[in-house]
Image (tube, grey):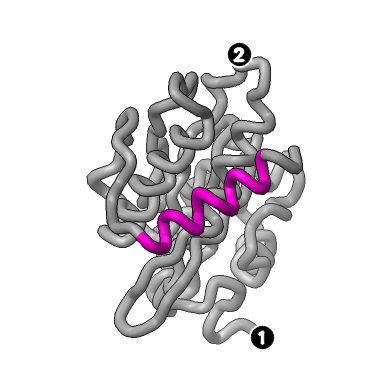
Amino acid sequence: MKNTIISLILLLAMSLFSNKVIACGKLTGKFAEVPKEAQEVLTLALGLFCKLQGKKPQWRNLRITQVARGIDSQARMIALCLQRDGCTVYENQEAITEIKSLKDKSQQSIANKIRTQIERGCYVSKHLTNRGVDVGTGWESQFENYKTLVDSLATIISEMSYTVGKKTYKPIVINKRHGTGPHLHINFPPYGFNPKKCPGSS
């Protein structure tokens, strides 16, 4: 693992001094829906990920499984996670608390609540915008070093940087195994809203 970390550091350092993208594999799925700066991050990260694996990379493609999510789809996921664990995974627990306070917790009622939350600038999930991106990881689990590869991919992406306006940001990567299956959930700030708060919440 120590050698892997050293290799990652060297590859990331190389990326800072070169605008060249290492050709390898492809990004598939909902890539076109991803913001331009996120496309650039993921393209470069894939090249570095392939380079890390050596001359014959076994994992050379990344599939974008989720970007912007509709209100009805989000309501369905919230209804399920309320039953499972109370939706503790969501960063905006103020939004979750508001939803939990509903007497009627049907999917339709939750969807209506999410709609009114958005109207006042409250977002229960970054997937309600295009600033949350999921990269699927589950189908590569046959690899003997699967966990190390997933961890390495997450590290590479999290150490990328990009500029929006005049500010520089880094992606926030969370390795998840729930909901839609194993995936890396990647947040790309800035969001245009407070990811932890709901305007008007008591």
Disc marking residue 142: 2
Q: Residue at x 45, y 19 (%)?
A: 56
- The location of residue 11, given as percent across then percent down, is 50, 49
Q: Is residue 16 magenta?
A: yes
Q: Residue at x 50, y 61 (%)?
A: 171
Q: Is residue 120 above or below residue 35?
A: below
The magenta span reads: 4-17
- The location of residue 187, given as percent across then percent down, is 49, 59
Q: Is residue 132 left or right of residue 93?
A: left
Question: Considering the image in quadrants, where does the C terminus appear?
Answer: bottom right
Please name the amino acid that badge 1 sits on.
Answer: Ser
Please name the amino acid that badge 2 sits on.
Answer: Gln
- The location of residue 34, given as percent across then percent down, is 31, 51
Q: Quadrant of residue 94?
A: bottom right
Q: Is residue 182 left or right of residue 168?
A: right
Disc marking residue 94: none
Callouts 2 and 1 close, C-beta under 8 Å:
no
Between the C-alphas of marks 2 and 1, the distance is 48 Å
Q: Is residue 35 magenta?
A: no
Q: Foreground: 75 or 170?
A: 170
On the image, numbered disc 1 is attached to which residue? 202
Question: Considering the image in quadrants, where does the N terminus appear?
Answer: top right
Q: Foreground: 84 or 177?
A: 177
Q: Which numbered disc, 2 or 1, marks the residue closer to the eye?
A: 2
Q: Quadrant of residue 191?
A: bottom left
Number of other residues with Cα within 10 Å of mark 2, as a class: few under 14, some 14 to 19, many 20 or more: few
Mark 2 or mark 1, earlier in chain: 2
Q: How many marks?
A: 2
Q: Residue at x 55, y 60 (%)?
A: 172
Q: Is residue 145 above or below residue 112?
A: above
